[in-house]
Image: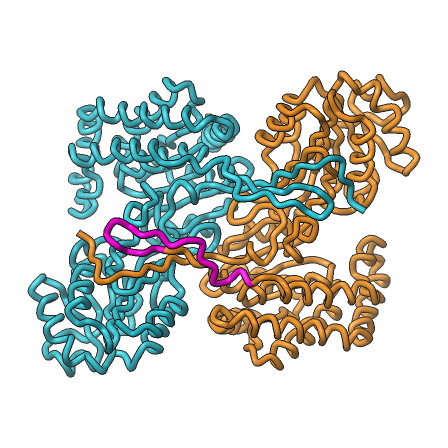
Chain colours: A cyan, B orange
Amino acid sequence: MSLKEEILKIAKEAKFASQKLANLSSATKDRALLRMAESIKINKEKIKEENSKDIALAKEKGLSKALIDRLTLNDKRIAGMWHTLEEIARMQDPIGKIESIQKRPNGLQIGKVVVPLGVIGIIYEARPNVTVDAGGLCLKAGNATILRGGSEAIHSNIILADLLREAVDKALLPQGCIQLIRTTDREAVMEMLKLDEYIDVIIPRGGESLIRTVTENSTIPVIKHYKGICHTYVDEEADLEMAERICFNAKVQRPGVCNAMETLLVDEEIAAKFLPQMIKRFQEAGVEIRGDKKTSQIVGGIKRASEEDWGTEYLDLILSIKVVEGIDEAINHINSYGSGHSDAIITNNYSRVKKFLQEVDSAAVYANASTRFTDGGEFGLGAEIGISTQKLHARGPMGANELTSTKFIIFGDGQIRC
Amino acid sequence: MSLKEEILKIAKEAKFASQKLANLSSATKDRALLRMAESIKINKEKIKEENSKDIALAKEKGLSKALIDRLTLNDKRIAGMWHTLEEIARMQDPIGKIESIQKRPNGLQIGKVVVPLGVIGIIYEARPNVTVDAGGLCLKAGNATILRGGSEAIHSNIILADLLREAVDKALLPQGCIQLIRTTDREAVMEMLKLDEYIDVIIPRGGESLIRTVTENSTIPVIKHYKGICHTYVDEEADLEMAERICFNAKVQRPGVCNAMETLLVDEEIAAKFLPQMIKRFQEAGVEIRGDKKTSQIVGGIKRASEEDWGTEYLDLILSIKVVEGIDEAINHINSYGSGHSDAIITNNYSRVKKFLQEVDSAAVYANASTRFTDGGEFGLGAEIGISTQKLHARGPMGANELTSTKFIIFGDGQIRC
């Protein structure tokens, strides 16, 4: 079988399975999810064994420490996987919900019911937990999943997908519910992206170049999960102690993730009062500061930020700082250089909170809290399949509810159109 | 200025305008809509004059009667345009709505607010009323629009867009709110489809080849409006008089539109009773019948349907008929050959209605009514920008509510993540 035929076969099986899945009861889906959790739990050692092959290869290839860390499955992370599956099983089923049925003047009763999307293709990089999270969330919402993970995690992904499929099979669901593309050939992705007859949505998770490649080559609708260039704006009426606490958290607590702060904007009215102590605290935590001219005038000996810095997602202990004339400049800066992910204002001024929340065009806009909260779990969605930074279909953290579509159902008693 | 620069300039202006539009009050937007209606109303003669140039050229080129009909603007159709704008002005503004704000255990209050999509590109064919409907609906939902109509309607589209822009200008909104691409060069579309930095969504309206071209070349998310291969299934427990009335309406009342019936499926239990009279009535109305083997056995002298017929959108007085073994065969046929647009069951059997509505995977699924009702106006959405046959973002008739996105707003009092 050629690669093309193989991918087509996978897509057809997924389509077939999705038609079955769409009509299953919540109880049946939840039982399958619990079986999946159980299967991960009792095969912990096997998973670690396969994972160690990936890690050995990664070390051989000299991959970065950060990447090897993301790749590594230890007891805690494996427990995280089955806990997630159990949590997904406990969540409410989004499918079948009808918000209201309206009656039209001619007597037709028209309602909109929540249905699965159908077949979802997930293309992701090194994290093997995506295999489990995505497979579980998609199943909850009645979708079939085609998974295509990064080549670095291929052994881990194969064992995880096999365990999930075994569980799905025991729960008497068609095996096409969850499929993994086992070849690491890049052409497989290209073939997949053309199968719009069978696949309803593609969700890429990973770096910018992956997402760009997928967007440019897909004839299937794509939900993008771009980078996070997150800002915190400290207004002149901020509680400066709170501002310091929030900014420190947003930058330092976990710098390598998309909801960490990359740029700090400070109102010039309070910059001289706020920045020296704030920068000192950052520097003590090992954060490299890159400031604009005004920042350098207030605190000596710091690196100057270039134009490029304002558009950079460091994902590291680096922070750019700009002193602004007020909220308008702050909002303009965010809407120009930001990535539409998460941005915060720290202030006690009511009208500036209102203005910031209204005018900043991002998936999550905060008043007086750390941007680090942008996350499906923190937002109460259970697990998340990613954070959408596009405006179509879903924006921000995506849970099972976002993996659905709707259809109109119409109840008549003989109506015809005049 | 090169074509590329020209399209880029339009896109940038739209982006700029969309930022203003997102923050306008409903009253301001509605005033602009009423000015647009007024402007169409008082310039009726000018519009007809420009339209006559398009018609003359169309006749010269020997375009089809149906196309010339779609192109033609008479008094009634022009009145339809400003009536639509007035109706859009009267509708509730979807923007700014917050369904609920939930409180998280850490005290964060998280809500989801409805916001505009941003910049919407509409690519359409001969109907000049789309210029007005799309411009009006997009404005209502706070979006900037880039319109690209078919070359056959270029004179009509230019005068209509000019009138809309004049009105928008008088209402003190930025002119970038509504822009028309004035060149008929096909390259303009290709340039537009790559500007994902400025344009948020592309909505193509037209034939299959237009939609295919747009989908294959766009790096911007596309909402597809594919063909309608609509079915009516007459079950053994149908009220046959009602079935005849509905089927006749679904096929004959306006055969050239996407929600007209193309295939009639009849349960074999009642086929011999139902079909002779039904086919006679169709034939008297000039409908060409293409039947399967069983249909021919019941009614002599009709053309045999080929495999191709089941997947064909005739948009004409042609109907394919298939006698099926029961509801399962009917649903399978619809899900295999249909286009996911609109399909109906006629029956008095409760469990088969439930099964049909559940299992048919289409945007609109009917019990005991004509598929001809799938329409924004009939569904109570005011005007419509089209009927989505994809599952992402919006499915079925799309009104102003479907031209929106959401963002999360989060109210904290100093929360940081642990």
Q: Residue placed at 50% from the left, 72% from the top?
A: B24
Residue A289 drawn at (x, y percent): 16, 69
Position of residue A119 relative to residue B349, above or below, is: below
Q: Residue placed at 29% from the left, 45% from the top?
A: A377
Position of residue B356 relative to residue A345, above or below, is: above
Q: Is residue B114 magenta?
A: no
Position of residue B25 relative to residue B272, above or below, is: below
Residue A97 drawn at (x, y percent): 50, 38
Q: In this view of the protein, which residue sits in the foreground, B170 or B220?
A: B170
In screen coordinates, is A330 left or right of A223? left
Position of residue B320 relative to residue B237, above or below, is: below
In screen coordinates, is A159 left or right of B353? left
Residue A269 drawn at (x, y percent): 22, 82
Q: Residue placed at 48% from the left, 65% from the top?
A: B198
Q: Is residue B109 magenta?
A: yes
In screen coordinates, is B171 left or right of B276? left
* Quarter of the figure with residue A267: bottom left
Magenta region: which residues? B93-110
